[in-house]
């Protein structure tokens, strides 16, 4: 209770300093936005209704006045979030669930790039005559979960996929994607492995865009220097300049990375499936060959900050920073709640119900303490510091976290019998055959693009929604 009064007093003092002219307007705004009281006053501002399937991706534009979303219904919607109304809605041209939608910078929000389970990277070009032209920019041989836009560039982005490849994509040319590397598993004696890592996440260091990090189906977050690679993966080898992994997870082969995030000071946030979230400083890296960095050398490294209490098991969840100076870390959870921790010290400061099932993605506003979230439900939720009350943690917070912890531990103890393994393999084969069949049934569309990169021109429509596929939780 004393801490609560202290936070309220600090907020009052900031207002007092502002009134007497001691605090500059910009500093005042940043301090209030970063205060713990502001986080504890976050409340549901409203819901955005319009998608017909699970919403898998949300992203604010550079100025923060427009939100873009993508869904299992394969549609992209642009929202005026302040009025909670849809501005534009269009069919993306994807053949499967959309996993990522991003605005390209310095394009007046007229270029939206998307990635999906069909392996495609596509561009939506918003025309001035009330139409959207969609084009395929590139394709992977596996699902594409994540895109990374080069800071300040209206043309360049990178994609990563479950096929293990990272591609360089140019928005100004059709089918311009080029493979720059294939992420491979680590082996003893620095040998090159033939086994690729299925990639889930790619992020670019905001302080030095020459560096990007990827994470996927093993325990290592890898950092690469783009200057070391030619735009042709056939002549490139997998050479990360640094790797990050908690000491106790090295060579466990039992976890994988679902999401990464860079802070404004180049700290790397790593979220693991059915494990925890870790914050790495630059000096915590294992080097380019983590298997040769074990033993005494690894023990000398500082341990990363750990964030716990949530559960990340059933979906590919995101992770993010929050606050004007990245003062907070936030994640969704299988229990349907939003977890917000102080970055320094990892104290849990807020726990909110964000979905009836699972919260997957969280998008912070670029300037003000506003948050957008989405999950298994078909709606997007908006959160603003509009509550009159300073909300404490719920009384059953320990019970919630213990249940999530038990779920993680029970899952880690589970053993796969040969029967279960064969069942999973049969399911995977059926899904692959169904995917191929869908591709063949849409062969006329695909052949149009393959022959000449012909684009679809789609009019805006509020009611024209394609049949939504069922939410995928695996």
Image: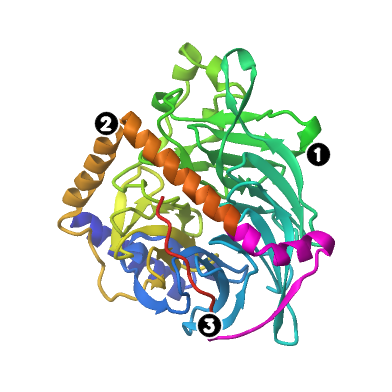
Location of residue 18 with respect to 460 vertically, above or below = above
In what element is the residue under mark 2?
helix
Q: Disc 3 or 2, which lies upstream in sequence? A: 3
- Work out whether 444 lies above or below 473: below
Query: Which label was assigned to residue 291?
Result: none
The disc at residue 86 is 3
Query: How crowded is the residue under tag 1: few (<14 C-alpha within 10 Å), some, or many (20+)?
Result: few
| Mark 3 and mark 2 residues within 8 Å of each other at the beta carbon | no
Task: Give percent across and percent down for residue 432.
Answer: 53, 48
Per the rendered image, the range of residues in magenta is 438-464
Camera-near label (1 vs 3) is: 1
According to the image, label 1 marks what residue?
232
Q: Earlier in the sequence, mark 2 or mark 1?
A: 1
Q: Is residue 48 magenta?
A: no
Camera-nearest residue between 367 and 188: 188
- Which residue is rendered at x = 50% and y = 15% of the image? 297
Q: Is residue 192 left or right of residue 313?
A: right
The quarter of the displayed image where residue 75 is located: bottom right
Q: Position of residue 469 (x, y in %)?
A: 47, 66
Secondary structure category for the residue under label 3? strand
Could you tell me which quadrant the N terminus lies in?
Answer: bottom left
Compare residues 97 and 302 and report the one nearer the observer: 97
Q: Distance from label 1 to label 3 (Cα)?
A: 41 Å
Q: Residue placed at 80% from the left, 68% from the top?
A: 454
Label 2 crowd (10 A; few <14 / some 14-19 / many >=20): few
User: Secondary structure beneath disc 1?
Assistant: loop
């Amino acid at each position: 209770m004393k801490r609560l009064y202290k936070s309220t007093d600090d907020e009052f003092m900031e207002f007092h300093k502002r009134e007497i002219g001691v605090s500059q307007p910009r500093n005042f705004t940043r301090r209030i936005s970063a205060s713990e009281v502001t986080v504890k006053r976050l409340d549901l501002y409203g819901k955005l209704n319009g998608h017909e399937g699970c919403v898998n991706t949300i992203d604010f534009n550079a100025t923060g006045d427009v939100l873009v979303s993508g869904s299992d219904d394969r549609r992209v919607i642009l929202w005026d979030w302040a009025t909670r109304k849809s501005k534009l809605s269009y069919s993306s041209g994807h053949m499967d669930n959309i996993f990522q939608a991003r605005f390209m910078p310095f394009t007046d929000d007229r270029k939206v790039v998307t990635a999906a389970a069909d392996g495609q990277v596509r561009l939506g070009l918003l025309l001035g005559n009330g139409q959207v032209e969609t084009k395929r920019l590139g394709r992977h041989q596996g699902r594409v979960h994540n895109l990374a836009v080069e800071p300040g560039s209206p043309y360049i982005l990178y994609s990563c996929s479950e096929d293990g490849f990272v591609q360089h994509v140019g928005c100004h040319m059709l089918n311009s994607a080029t493979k720059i590397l294939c992420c491979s598993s680590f082996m003893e004696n620095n040998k090159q492995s033939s086994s690729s890592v299925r990639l889930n996440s790619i992020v670019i260091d905001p302080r030095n865009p020459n560096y990007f990090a990827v994470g996927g189906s093993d325990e290592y977050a890898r950092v690469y220097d783009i200057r070391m690679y030619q735009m042709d993966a056939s002549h490139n080898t997998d050479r990360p300049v640094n790797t990050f992994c908690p000491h106790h997870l090295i060579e466990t082969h039992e976890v994988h990375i679902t999401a990464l995030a860079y802070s404004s000071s180049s700290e790397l946030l790593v979220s693991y499936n059915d494990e925890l979230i870790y914050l790495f400083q630059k000096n915590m890296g294992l080097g380019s060959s983590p298997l040769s960095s074990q033993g005494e050398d690894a023990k000398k490294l500082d341990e990363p900050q750990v964030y716990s209490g949530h559960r990340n098991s059933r979906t590919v969840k995101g992770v993010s920073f929050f606050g004007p100076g990245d003062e907070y870390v936030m994640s969704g959870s299988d229990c349907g709640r939003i977890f917000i921790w102080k970055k320094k010290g990892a104290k849990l400061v807020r726990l909110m119900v964000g979905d009836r099932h699972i919260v997957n993605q969280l998008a912070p506003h670029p300037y003000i303490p506003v948050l957008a979230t989405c999950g298994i439900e078909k709606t997007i939720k908006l959160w603003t510091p509009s509550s009159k009350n300073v909300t404490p943690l719920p009384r059953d917070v320990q019970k919630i976290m213990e249940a999530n912890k038990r779920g993680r531990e029970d899952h880690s103890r589970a053993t796969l019998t040969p029967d279960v393994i064969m069942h999973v393999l049969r399911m995977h084969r059926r899904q692959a055959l169904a995917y191929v069949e869908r591709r063949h049934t849409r062969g006329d569309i695909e052949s149009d693009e393959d022959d000449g990169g012909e684009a679809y021109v789609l009019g805006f429509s509020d009611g024209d929604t394609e049949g939504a596929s069922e939410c995928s939780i695996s």
